[in-house]
Image: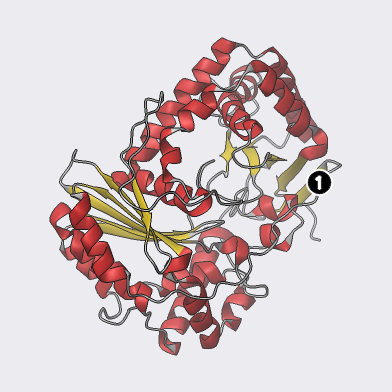
Amino acid sequence: MLLLALAALPTLGWGQTPASTSSMQVPVTYYKLPNGLKVVLSPDKTAPTIAVGVYYNIGFRIEPKNRTGFAHLFEHMMFQGSENLGKMEFIQLVQKNGGILNGSTRFDFTNYFEVMPAHKLETALWAEADRMRGLKITQENLTNQQGVVKNEVKVNVLNQPYGGFPWLDMPQYANKNWYNAHNFYGDLKDLDSAKLGDVDAFFKTFYAPNNAVLVVSGDFEVPAARQMVDKYFSKIASSQLPPPPDLTEPKQTAEQRFVKEDKLAKKPAIAVAYKMPARNTPEYFAMGIIDQILVQGQDSRLYQQLVQTKGYTNSVSGGINFALGNMYDYNGPMLWMSNLIYDSTLAPDSIIAEYDKAIANLANVTNEDLQMALVKIRSGLYDAMGGNFGIGKVNLLACFALFDNDPNRINNLENEFKKVTPELIRRTVQNYLTPTNRTILIIDPKAPKA
């Protein structure tokens, strides 16, 4: 379902999280197997459960051209059976042992995870290694899952009012590089055209240990877990990975404005997006603070102006990597966006004027404003870490290992946000929250056909 240069490798072995002034203290053991598999172990004795996640460094952003939706389609294929587990048996294995499982496809990764009783850790590791080693790729399974994904597209996008707005739509309008701008859910004709050979080549290339990270969190002992990981994963062959595609976006120099017809929508809607600073820069962390001030919660400035003061709408939603993750779990060009539904008697420019006021008022941001935003960020981090039975923490550890080669970043995030000053906020606003860096998308129920 849908839902940068690497630093030098740390010394392999029993590395523990260094001392930090952050309140976040997640135990992390990080190492690599000889076949390239990154492994993150994070013991947590608060509940007798374990959470296992396998993240592959392949998302819909870098799927093959003329195969839109292929990464998502392949996610479904991974549940169709492997060498020792038949079709649907992986799901049954987890559920009959009292566990839950799922998978998702995002911009820069595809992930699979399960949460099970702690004594079933070896079972979970064996099952994940089994499908990494060899997937059952048959025409029957492919045809079946093409139908499933096509139906998902119809239900979630084509036959829904505001379907795909703005999370699926906005990247296609705001970006210019095909890898960032194509319909990653999949065009129906592209989904139909996927061949068995495409699936086999995709699996052998990208679903390999040297393109993945394994994360284990929960109630376990590190030495025992290391032995299990080595037993089941160390002999899986690595692959020859292709050079990563160039994801660079050209600099935007003028505001972009688009109108999209939606025959199912009852009211117009508007989404406003700005291209983000590069990940892990000071301005990136400043945008995290700005996001909290402008759009997160009913105390946010856009909510106060558009809902409480003007009455233009009853809610405002938005964020970084909005609706597809968070500001930590991507690795390429990204948008900060927000959206709302409004009454047809209202002119879109009236809404944009309120955005401009809220952004202009950031010039007056105070240290007290920053402290309030930091409290919300800290709360959000703890919510994310505890979410979905611990999979939220697995997600952060996996992405920091995949993209930064440093899962210990989880313990330093708060310190990075603490470095943000009012002056940095003002500089970030001047450089990024400008009309020339903005894309506006309007959903118009009465728009003429193209």
Q: Is residue 427 visible?
A: yes
Q: Residue placed at 52% from the left, 59% from the top? A: 156
Image color mode: secondary structure
Does 110 sit left or right of 96 as displayed?
right
Occupied quadrant, residue 390 = top left
* Residue plotted at (22% across, 62% down): 227
* Residue 347 can be seen, yes or no: no
Residue indicated by mark 1? 251
Q: Which x, y percent locates residue 109? A: 50, 59
Of residues 232 and 50, the one drawn nearer to the viewer in this rendering: 232
Q: In x, y percent, where is residue 434?
A: 78, 32
Relative vertical location of residue 79 with respect to residue 259 in this rendering, above or below: below
**Which residue corresponds to the image point at 55% horizontal and 57% vertical from the top-left?**
108
Q: Residue at x 66, y 20 (%)?
A: 310
* Image quadrant in which you'd find residue 148: bottom left
Q: Residue 277's spot in the image, x, y percent?
A: 68, 39
Q: Quadrant of the N terminus?
A: bottom left
Seen in the picture, residue 382 relative to 53 is either above or below; the reply is above
Quadrant including the C terminus: bottom right
Q: Is residue 187 left or right of residue 36?
A: right
